[in-house]
Amino acid sequence: MPSEKTVTKSPIAAIKTSAKSSADKVAKTAPKRKHIKYEDKSGGQPELIPIFNSIKALMKLYVKGTLKERGEAAGIYNLVSEKQVEIEGRKKDELYFASIIIQKGYVGFYFMPVYGVNKPEEVFHPNLLKHLKGKACFHIKKNDPDLLEQIKDALKVGLDLYKKRGWF
């Protein structure tokens, strides 16, 4: 009877092979994820586009001086102060003021002047505060005229705050 050669693997090689085969199995069964671009979000959610456009129109009223539009694309709009400023000893060439972006199920309104106040209640109306998620992000889900008026008021207060600090 011919002798068979037995190949033995080291314990480390066996673990690596086992881990690789497990990863291959998971990769084959896991659903493939598609990278979602902002254009995809805005085009796929037509009910959010009027909200986005309403807030964008309010923000466009403040494009003057060093406050410039930036990164305008489908589903994204930013206002940035292009003035060199120093904040807590750190020099910055620009400072974001406000941004809007269509997300999944809401329009995100990001309002940076809120970082300059101790109490958000000083800047925002109570109805707008209901939409606050975190410190500076609001999730706007419907085109409410009262809410838009409150956003307009917040933009004015924020601009005044930037002027007062010399950031605009």
Image: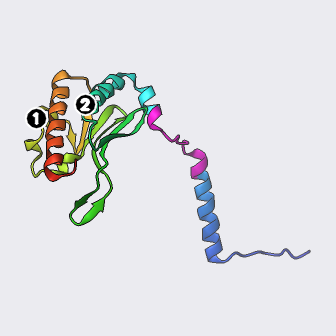
Residue situated in front as seen by the camera: 143 or 77: 77
Using the image, tell me which numbered label, if any, was put on residue 48: none
Quarter assignment of residue 2: bottom right
Where does label 2 land, which residue? 61
Say few, some or many: other residues with alpha carbon within 10 Å of mark 1 (under 14 / 14 to 19 / 20 or more): some
Q: Looking at the picture, how far across and down is residue 37, in whole percent?
A: 47, 38
Residue 3 in view, yes or no: yes
- On screen, residue 120 versus residue 81, left or right, reads left
Where does label 1 land, which residue? 125
Mark sitting earlier along the chain (2/1)? 2
Q: In the image, what residue occupies the spot 10% across and 35% down?
A: 125
Cα separation, mark 2 vs mark 1, equals 20 Å
Residue 67 part of the magenta segment = no
Say few, some or many: other residues with alpha carbon within 10 Å of mark 2 (under 14 / 14 to 19 / 20 or more): few
Q: Looking at the picture, how far across and down is residue 32, in whole percent?
A: 55, 42
Residue situated in front as seen by the camera: 99 or 41: 99
Residue situated in front as seen by the camera: 96 or 142: 96
Vertical comparison of 148 with 164: above or below: above
Q: Give the secondary structure at mark 2.
A: loop
Residue 130 in view, yes or no: no
The magenta stretch spans which residues?
26-39
Please say which color scheme the image uses.
rainbow
Q: Looking at the picture, how far across and down is residue 84, in whole percent?
A: 29, 55
Quarter assignment of residue 142: top left
- On screen, residue 132 versus residue 3, left or right, reads left
For marks 2 and 1, give the one nearer the viewer. Answer: 2
**Residue type highlighted by circle 2:** Leu
Q: In the image, what residue occupies the spot 64% across and 66% down?
A: 17
Q: In the image, what residue occupies the spot 30% across and 30% down?
A: 56
Q: Looking at the picture, how far across and down is residue 134, in whole percent?
A: 22, 47
